[in-house]
Amino acid sequence: MFPVTYSTFRKRLHLTILSFILFGCLGVYAQNVTSPYSIIGIGDLEQSYFNRTSGMANTGIAYSNNSFVTINNPASLSSLTNQLFLVELSGRGKFVKYSGTGVTPGLSAQDFSVEKMSLGIRINKWWGAAAGLMPYSTSNYSFSGNQNLQGSNLTVPVDYDGSGGVNRFFFASGFKITKNLSLGFNASYLGGSLLQQDSLFSSDAASNIYTKKNIYIRDLYLDYGLQYHIKLSKKWNVNLGFTYAPETALKAEYTALIKDGIGDTLSNKTISNTIFTLPTNTGFGISIVKDNKLTFLADYRFQNWSPLNQSGPNYRLINSNRYSAGVEYSKQKDYLGARYEILNLQAGVFYNDSYLQINNQQVNDKGFTLGVGVNSKRSTMSYHLAFEYGVRGSQYTPIKENYASFTIGISYKDFWYTKGKKFD
């Protein structure tokens, strides 16, 4: 990569941002994968960061890379290459097969959507920063069941449909405090809406009940990170990582419209200033690096849901634990006195006890990932592809989801305009 003029840089940046907008609009209409579990809370919490760690089961609390934006731990941004400007775009295709009581045999779904857009830059010798947009949670479901009528032993059929989610616009910074210690923070604005529609049917069509609920969520969310580097020898290094997010109350507005079978409004109300609380979130990670080529990583994340006492019929929210491990091999070569990466290979495994307990059974998620990345020889583009296979739920939970997903990431790198100023 070589320095470019400001006008050339500006043209490239404008083209890149325009591409992001166009791809983002294409992804909005491609959400077809559903999950009955996303009816609870604010939906399925996103476990992927859609970055270079996707091929390592998103293991990255102690991981840093000087040529990619990784916000698994915001402290890692302090290691970005001097004067390097990064633009990244990620999309995911997913296929899910469902099984369980009452599930139509062979039922499946698939989709593709653009998931993340981010910009990263090292502002000076001790400060790296990134900004972007990615999902925080998603809600998308459609299924039928039976509901008991209050005051009787009768049950009636009911359809449940929902969509929406909460997006995360983030600004993250990493600061190099000493040669070995980096600190960081991530300030995010969480905002989005959840649409829930229930249709309750009876033998008399005029007695049908249709309920439409909208929940609008918004607020600031902060999380923090630390990384500490230990040089064991000329070949071996160890990195330790820690992340923390305090309990956060999100502001919410709730609207509910209820109509009968002939379209008459039975109730229409709005409740403002309600609260949905996110729990304390902590994480610990370690990475062991040999010759800056071979990296072994392990993470543990904990979410403290139980003290919030959030529950409903046949379910409650309980503490969540996620374990993951990964390995990465980086193939490099020397060119003009500098070392460049030309290829990377990755693998990872994960196990997640989710925050959902249904019928006294915690819903878990487990699987493995594979990844490969290539740096273009003709340009400053990089490409990364990750494959994930997992199983959510078990024979003891109402629904079991076997899924496979492909994540593709595209990264554009260039030097940013500094009026000739250089720094270490």
Image (cartoon, rainbow, N blue to C red):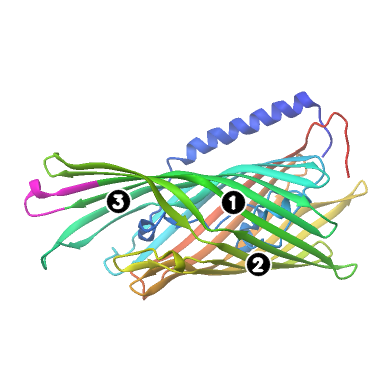
In the image, which disc is placed on residue 222? 1
Q: Position of residue 130 (x, y in %)?
A: 68, 44
Q: Quadrant of residue 413?
A: top right
> Mark 2 and 1 residues: CB-CB less than 8 Å, in contact?
no
As measured in the structure, the alpha-carbon distance from the residue carrying label 2 to the one carrying label 1 is: 17 Å
Q: Residues within 10 Å of mark 2 (few under 14, many from 20)?
A: many
Label whose residue precedes the other's in the sequence (2 or 1): 1
Which region of the structure is painted magenta? 201-211
Label whose residue precedes the other's in the sequence (3 or 1): 3
Amino acid on which disc 3 is placed = Asp
**Picture residue at 44% right of the left edge, 64% below the top:** 308
Magenta stretch: includes residue 208: yes
Q: Residue furthest front?
A: 273
Is residue 12 visible in the rendered image? The answer is: yes
Label whose residue precedes the other's in the sequence (3 or 2): 3
Q: Nearer the viewer, mark 2 or mark 1?
A: 1
Q: Quick check: 272 left or right of 349?
A: left
Q: Position of residue 251 (x, y in %)?
A: 44, 47
Q: Residues within 10 Å of mark 1 (few under 14, many from 20)?
A: some
As measured in the structure, the alpha-carbon distance from the residue carrying label 3 to the one carrying label 1 is: 32 Å
Q: Position of residue 4 (x, y in %)?
A: 81, 30
**Picture residue at 13% right of the left edge, 49% below the top:** 208
As measured in the structure, the alpha-carbon distance from the residue carrying label 3 to the one carrying label 2 is: 37 Å
Q: Quick check: 149 left or right of 316?
A: left
